[in-house]
Amino acid sequence: MLKPLVRLLIAQGVTHAEFSETAKEVYVETALRHFEKEGKINKSRVAILTGLTRKEVKNVVDRALTTSANDKTHSRPARVLTGWYSDPAYQGPYGIPLELPYETSGDGEPSFVALVKNYSGDMAPRQMLNQLLEAGSVVEVDGRYKTVSRIFMHTKLSSSALNRLGKVGYRFFSTAAKNTDADKDAGEKTLFDRMVFADDGCTDEVIELFAEYLRSRGQSFLEDLDVWFSSRKDLNKPGQPRKETGVYMLHYVEEQDDLGSLQILLQERGISKVN
C-alpha cells in the first residue's frame, strides 16, 4: 500500500518527518471519529488506540487547533536555503547571500559544507548540493556556489492532480477496508469489489493490446453508467442527505521489482551491513 505512495512523496520532496507528522494527525483524527466518540478527548484512550504517547496526542490536537491549513514543515533543502539567506555568517554587505566554496580548510570559514551541517544535520553535503543544483535554486560560478532562489521547488504535481490522487486513494482504500472489515456472518453488506487478471501474466506487447481494448470497452461501460445515473436523478428525494458514489476503473501493471522487501533488495545488491 505504501510503496507507490512513498515513491511519489519522495519525488515531490515530502520528507519522512512531514509524512510522519501527517500520519500522526490522521491516526488521532480516525481514532476520535470512529473509535472514541465522547465529547471530551481522553488522551490516554487515544494513545492506547493509536500507539502514540499522551504527549504526542496532545501535540497533535494542539497543532490542529492552532495551525493554519497552509502551514508546512520546511524540507531540508528549504532549511538550507533559509539559513543561507538569513544567517549573517553566510551573508555579505546589505544581507546578500555569499557565493560559497564547497568546503574550506579553516574552521569557522563559511562554506557550503558548513552551511549544510548547520541547517540540515547529517545529510550528505554533496547530495544536498546536487538537489539544489537540479532544482535551479543554486548555480555554480567559477568554482563557487551561488544561491539564486530562496525557494526550493521539486517538479510539483498540479493542485488538481494531487486532489484527484487523494480522492482516488480515499475511495479505493475506504472501499477495500470496509469490505475487509465487514461482518459477513451478521449479514453486513459489502460494496462491489471484483477483479480480473491474466493468470500467467502478459508480455509488454499483450499489455499494450489490452490497454487499447480497455480504453474502448471501459469507456463505453462508464458511459453506460453515466446514463444510468442521469436517468435516475428524479429518484433522489429532495431534502434527504446524499453521498458521493460511483465506479472507478483502473488498469494496473505490477512491476516485480517493486514487490520485494527491503531485505531482498539488500541481498540482491550484496549488502550485508552498512558502514
Image (spheres, rainbow, N blue to C red):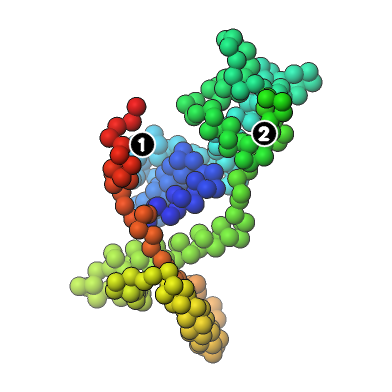
Residue 192 figure quarter: bottom left
Q: Nearer the viewer, residue 198 or 221?
A: 198
Q: Residue furthest top?
A: 106
Q: Secondary structure at mark 1?
A: helix
Tag in front: 2 or 1: 2
Q: Earlier in the sequence, mark 2 or mark 1?
A: 1
Relative height, residue 72 to residue 194 (above, below): above
The crowding category of the residue bearing disc 2, from other C-alpha atoms within 10 Å (few below 14, some 14 to 19, many at least 20), is many
* Residue pointed to by mark 2: 138
Secondary element at image label 2: strand
Q: Residue at x 57, y 41 (%)?
A: 72
CA distance separating discs 2 and 1: 42 Å
As drawn, is 67 to the left or to the right of 49?
Answer: right
Q: Is residue 101 above or below residue 197?
A: above
Residue annotated with mark 1 = 54
Residue 113 on image: x %, y %: 57, 22
Q: Position of residue 149 (x, y in %)?
A: 70, 36
Q: Nearer the viewer, residue 231 or 86?
A: 86
Q: Quadrant of the C terminus?
A: top left
Q: Amino acid under label 1?
A: Arg
Residue 63 location, x and y as percent? Answer: 51, 40
Residue at image coords 41%, 75%: 206
Compared to residue 84, the image places residue 210 above or below, namely below
- Drawn side of residue 272 relative to residue 140, left or right: left
Above or below 158: residue 263: above
In the image, 40 versus 109, the foreground residue is: 109
Mark number displayed over residue 252: none
